[in-house]
Image (tube, coloured by chain):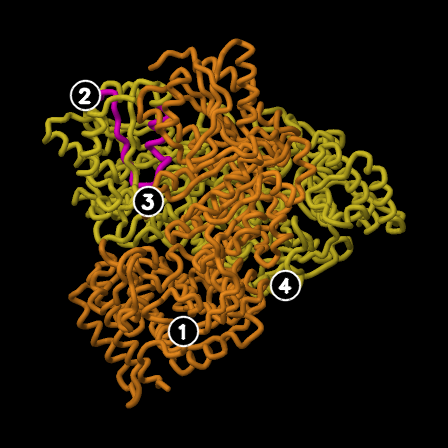
Chain colours: A orange, B yellow
Amino acid sequence: MTTSGAVHKKAADLAKLVVRMTAEAGSGHTSTALSLAHLVIHLMYRRMRYDLSDPRHASADRLVLSGGHGVPIIYAAYADLGGTVGRDGEEPVRLTREDLDRLRSRQSFLDGHPNPAEGFPFFDAATGSLGQGLSVAAGLALAAKLDGTDRRVYALIGDGESREGQIWEAADFIVDYHLNNVCAVFNCNGQGQAGDVSPQQSPERIAAKLEAFGWKTTTIDGHDPALIAEVFARVGRSERPIAIIARTVKGWGVAALQEGNWHGKPLKMSQVEAANQSIDDTVAGLFDAEGELAGPMTPIPAATPAREPRSPAAVTWPTFTEAMQSAGLGPALEQGKLATRKGYGAALKVAGDLLPQVVALDGDVSNSTFSEIFARVHPDRFFECKIAEQNMVSVAVGLSAAGYIPFVNSFAKFIARACDQIEMANISRANIKLVGSHAGISLAADGPSQMGLLDVGYFRGFTAVRADDRQSPLCWLFHPADAVAAYHCTRLMTELRGMCYMRTHRPDVALIYDPQTTFQPGGFHLLATGDELAIVAAGYMVHIARQAIDQLAEQDVRATLVDAYSLPLDGERLMETLRRAGQCALVVEDNYGGGLGAAVAEIAAHAGDVRVETLCCQRIPKSTLTPEDMLDYCGIGAAQIAEHALAARRRPAG
Amino acid sequence: MTTSGAVHKKAADLAKLVVRMTAEAGSGHTSTALSLAHLVIHLMYRRMRYDLSDPRHASADRLVLSGGHGVPIIYAAYADLGGTVGRDGEEPVRLTREDLDRLRSRQSFLDGHPNPAEGFPFFDAATGSLGQGLSVAAGLALAAKLDGTDRRVYALIGDGESREGQIWEAADFIVDYHLNNVCAVFNCNGQGQAGDVSPQQSPERIAAKLEAFGWKTTTIDGHDPALIAEVFARVGRSERPIAIIARTVKGWGVAALQEGNWHGKPLKMSQVEAANQSIDDTVAGLFDAEGELAGPMTPIPAATPAREPRSPAAVTWPTFTEAMQSAGLGPALEQGKLATRKGYGAALKVAGDLLPQVVALDGDVSNSTFSEIFARVHPDRFFECKIAEQNMVSVAVGLSAAGYIPFVNSFAKFIARACDQIEMANISRANIKLVGSHAGISLAADGPSQMGLLDVGYFRGFTAVRADDRQSPLCWLFHPADAVAAYHCTRLMTELRGMCYMRTHRPDVALIYDPQTTFQPGGFHLLATGDELAIVAAGYMVHIARQAIDQLAEQDVRATLVDAYSLPLDGERLMETLRRAGQCALVVEDNYGGGLGAAVAEIAAHAGDVRVETLCCQRIPKSTLTPEDMLDYCGIGAAQIAEHALAARRRPAG
């Protein structure tokens, strides 16, 4: 049994490390880190069951630092303990106290904010954009329940960041799923960046809110080791999830940091000595005779893997027709028309049949996205996140860190609620699959508030960045034109490592592909060949472009039709195709600019010998009764495409 | 005094209209609309003070329908009352009951979800993407306080959508700003789209949460006219904001709609007659002898405009130097280096000096974005939104609807929290200005969780869409390279109607522009001219490109440097420039793909006679100690640019 004195002694020790490393780096959130000293020491030296030489152990307790800027105190503790660091594929090493002085430098494992991908595997996800950590913790805790392990997940959350609505989305989700293996710790130091936190984020208010959300709360002095030990001992023993509201001192230990606004500001090297003295003064008289804190002492809970993941590349998928029939879509199939969202839904169910690590999340629209097919067959792996998309994406990041392959479903429009969470997922290198339905304008009657019009442009940004292998893109985008394509692209998403985004549409459309057709990342298919011009389209617009091709044929204009179902495109092959098609391409899209048209233009402008025009949605849509009327309203109907194609073909260069 | 019977009678009447119009349209949320019948009737016929012939009256009460899919009941009431409709610039007309049958059709003012821009000025903002309405209401209420009017703002919120964290961000904000002129009405019909709402969104839980957030709540039967009247009479008389939790019946009046899941599904025309009978049965015995509901009866509160807006184009701005001095940046200026965020901060303060309708919002980072300069001088028009970006953007939409010009400030990365809200702002045609600081990778040490890397790509999507004038883009993007440019671009943002986005950077950089330089939307400047190649850059990268230009000059390669400080670019002028510069351009960007490079490539691929390459951030950044190290890590340092430029110049076409 360690004593409070030993904790204070360790707090003083680590506080000095924090002061020094941030002064050395010339940046960092010294004062926030110091406010966490005693809480972090309790968790990392006394409470958490984990293995310093195997921080990713499948059933070890986890810590999510939601307020990621406080990370120096965790680096200090981990270095003191000698925990293992190292990037994937590199020889792991033990972190030393000397390593701390390279905080934030280019070669360091110690990034400015938590980032497992840079070699700090103690964390499961990148944090630093605020308010996301409790959701990540919920995902990890959900995975623990699925795995049947007794893992506990601790989330450290700042008082200021608890203003983010996502924290409260997570609070709801954790109650809905009875995740009493989560412990949320609110670090109430009372100060934000630009000023004091609002009274709405006072310890009393945060506690009252959490109680109203159905949590069990206890408020303590966050620098009192005995109180901390007492309250943490209750975690996991309550039906309700437990939140600990800790009153702390920003800049604990260093008097100078407690005057004025020191948020995000380190001390100068010349001030370190005085700071150390201040720390010593703070703990003077708090030491007692016995006890030294060593490493984590409790054994890790036994791992009882409930399901053994299978290699996505090793399983055999049924034929498209078998899959549709097994999903109850056989009768629909016979009519020759099926929406891409339905083809995807059936594929998702098959993915679940084949791969026990596939899970699905939806935001109260599973009967629109057709993730409901999965939900019916695999209810234990389907998570209804309700109308809270930010939490949904970050929960998926937690599930991914625990080895699952989460498919995240909503309308494309509402997935945009989680753009920042999606970017954090990529920084975390999360293996998540996002599927946005009702994309583009073809849903017509519901109007623009339900339409995904910027999704291609947004996700395309990621496709231009390289993943850590320096080969693959950071994200693959799939935009299938029919249910066959949607089925095969879903399979590809299970096989590809990292983020994938698929865009599906509402209307039932003709099946244009033979069920056996091969699809591949970055691939495209030719649906017509002509030597005067190419029309490039994807998804729903392939069908409209086919009508335009027919209209052009009536005028004896032979056009090529490219179904660009995946980004980033294979540029060389595309250019060969476009050269054979009259060195002139018209790209049509049912969204705002910056999407497929820009992707093709970049390739063509690089090559320099093919002209490209884009016809995208020309104005903000409004409701219309039919997709045809909507296409016309937005300037991208079949006749308008044909007209533009003719003009593009005739226009001289320059 | 009207009686309950008259309300029930009206409810039956409007319910039949709702059933019919959605059946005619073949889509629409019949059952949700019916659950709102009595609440809407109370508000629109008895409680709200507004003018049917002038629904935009500056001090009239306002209604925000957060759960926008319930809108048919409001259309029915407004048609019954004969309220004014019409798009801007068109002759206003009175809505008739017959007009309802054109719901959702192309020519109709009645969009699938609330949208003032399509001719329904009773609303202030587009809704339909959930969870945003309470924030819009807060913005309208804040404007009422600024204006000194007694306007009250009612927000109708669904139980399911109260899962969105943004509702709780708004709840905090409303308490922080003592907006007791807001009344939030929660429509608890118990059903979401895919299933029942969670127990976390039960009336009891919602009430408990709101009380914990500091609101005063009352729970009522949402179909009891007497109770409704009693509780609404208390609005505005309490110190605390009032929330009314109304238990309602989804599909009220129509038995068939109350069995199974009818969310978002209209009845067929053949079912209308039976539905009407069911409605009659529901209200049978509830009528009493007296009373008919007429129009809104209470006089509109007097307008006492506290500040008269000035025309942004008519005011005279001080010189750049005067402005910097007046903002306390004189000493910094003398050193010849100033960050764009500081130039912007000073400009924002000047905008506030000159234009009483300019307001600023920030999310706890005003000492980083430099909106703090404005806050110091104009504290009454500065709103600290704390760490809750979604609410901040939607509050700005409300302020804009009330005639203010809001500048919304945060890190570019965190503005991405509000992508969906930003898109809704555009659907609302809100006149808001967004400014994202710490964009790109130059902040270095804090790492990728703080970096705006997709913002240019995202906002560029809007720049490709036309605004309602069919001429201007829906959004202008500004990306100034120095404080002079930032100053002038801020002025442009005040003058341009509609959304503008400005991107600023952390580091102090050299002043490269003469203070008198002219800037214009879509413009660019040449900072060097050479005939072998052009480098196109913006913002911070202009400075790095200048270094590359110098390195090229040492190798006797004469390159043009284009500072593309605004999007969408003037394509024709750009092409002339690039043709003179060797018909070969290298675009460099400190963000992921899809930004400036794609914009230039689209123009060039259209013209067909200039080759374009893009060098953007090649990988996910990590912390480095200096911007130089970061540029090198991401592959876009000066030497790397020069190297790519040489290769691009030598590469043959094709």
Between B562 and A301, the residue placed more toward the observer is: A301
Percent of width and height locating residue A92:
28, 62
Looking at the rendered structure, whether the residues under marks 1 and 2 are on a common chain is answered as no
Q: CA distance from mark 3 to mark 2?
A: 31 Å
Q: Amino acid at mark 1?
A: Met
Q: Which residue is mark 2?
A: B531
Q: Amino acid at mark 2?
A: Asp
> Disc number at residue B205?
4
Looking at the rendered structure, whether the residues under marks 3 and 1 are on a common chain is answered as no
> Label 3 marks which chain's residue?
B
Q: Amino acid at mark 3?
A: Ala
B438 relative to A545, above or below = below
Q: Which residue is mark 3?
A: B439
> Label 2 marks which chain's residue?
B
Q: Residues within 10 Å of mark 1 (few under 14, many from 20)?
A: many
Between B202 and B2, the residue placed more toward the observer is: B202
Q: Earlier in the sequence, mark 3 or mark 2?
A: 3
